[in-house]
Structures are given as C-alpha cells and as structure tokens.
Image (spheres, grey):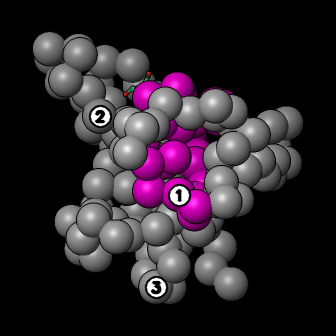
Amino acid sequence: MHDLLALAETAALKAYAPYSKFQVGCALETLSGQIYTGCNVENASYGLTICAERNAVFQGVAQEGAAVKVVRAAVVCLGHEFPPCGACRQVIAEFSLADGKTEVTFLRGGQPVTRTIAELLPEAFVIPS
Ligand code: THU
C-alpha cells in the first residue's frame, strides 16, 4: 500500500504559498490504483487560491475523467495540522465511493487520524436526480 502521507508531504514542498506560508500537500489513490498529488497554489488575489486537496482531486479528473473515484486521500501541512477544509470535503465527496467510505487521513498530535468522507461531511449537498 502506498504511503499517502509521505507522498502528501513531498507534494507540500511544491506549494506556492507566499501569503499564508502554509505549505499543504495531498496525495490520493483512485479505484483504478492510480496515485495523484496536489499542493496549494495561492494568488495575489487571495480568493483565487486553490487548496492542495482540490488540486489533487482535479488532477485525478483530468487524467481519468468524470468517473474517477477517490478511495483514500491524505493531507499534510508542513509545520501545522488540520483536516481538509469544508470546500475540499465537498469536492472529495463529489468523487468519493458511493457508500461514503472514502478514507481521508490527516495528522493530529503527529499521529495519523483517518475518517471517512461521510464522517467529515455528513449530509453532503448533492443535486437530486
Ligand atoms: N489550505 C489547503 O491547501 N487545504 C485545506 O484544507 C485548508 C487550507 C491552504 C489554502 C491556503 O493556501 C492556505 O492553506 C491557508 O489557508
């Protein structure tokens, strides 16, 4: 099994974060077994910033297309610890396993904590079909 936390940490080194100084990385594995990574990319117009997690998910969509499914994801911020922000939870949910069991790992007190996307974002917004 790939060490997604280690890959996320490596991705964080690529972050463009001159404003917040928060270097964030994300690595995820898809149902097809592919690995994608992303880092946060900030902008002088702050609202244009993209988080590491969304960057990684969008890499997956760009490579595998609309049917991509995220099985596991890990997020690391150099020198800080936090779970994915609300916007990133919503985007992960969009491409998560149908049962909501997609696993998201982050650090707390230096230890990995894993939650399902359903736990991180209960009652997610979906467009009714
Ligand atoms: N950030 C992420 O990359 N992921 C998150 O889940 C939360 C925040 C980034 C965005 C911004 O570049 C910096 O961290 C501070 O908010």
Mark found first going from the N terminus, 1 or 3: 3
Question: Residue at coordinates 65% horizontally, 46% vertically from top-left?
Answer: 117
Q: Which residue is at the front of the view, 121 or 35?
A: 121
Amino acid under disc 1 = Ser
Residue span colored magenta: 73-98
The answer for how far apart the CA atoms under marks 1 and 3 are is 13 Å
Asked if disc 1 and disc 2 are in contact, CB closer than 8 Å, the reply is no
Q: Quadrant of ligand 1?
A: top left
Of the residues shown, which amino acid type is indicated by label 3?
Answer: Ser
Kindly identify the residue that appears in the image at 49 percent across and 31 percent down. 125
Q: Is disc 3 surrounded by few (<14), some (14 to 19) or many (20+) residues within 10 Å?
A: few
First of labels 2, 3 by sequence position: 3
Residue 118 in view in this figure:
yes
Whether residue 35 is situated above or below residue 15 in the rendered picture: below
Q: What residue occupies the far left of the structure in this picture?
A: 45
Q: Residue furthest front?
A: 129
The foreground one among 67 and 128 is 128
Assess whether residue 81 is covered by the magenta stretch.
yes
Which mark is drawn over residue 40?
Answer: none
- First in sequence: mark 1 or mark 2? 2
Element at label 1: loop
Q: Which marked residue is nearer to the observer: mark 2 or mark 3?
A: 3
Disc 1 to disc 2, C-alpha distance: 19 Å
Viewer-proximal residue, 99 or 109?
99
Q: Which mark is residue 50?
A: 2
- Look at mark 3 in the image and give the residue it sits on: 32
Q: Nearer the viewer, residue 2 or 16?
A: 2
Along the horizontal axis of the image, is 8 left or right of 53? Answer: right
- Looking at the figure, which quarter contains the C terminus? top left
How far across and how far down the image is residue 75, in percent? 58, 48
Q: Can you tell which quarter of the image residue 87 is in?
A: top left
Residue with the mark numbered 1: 96
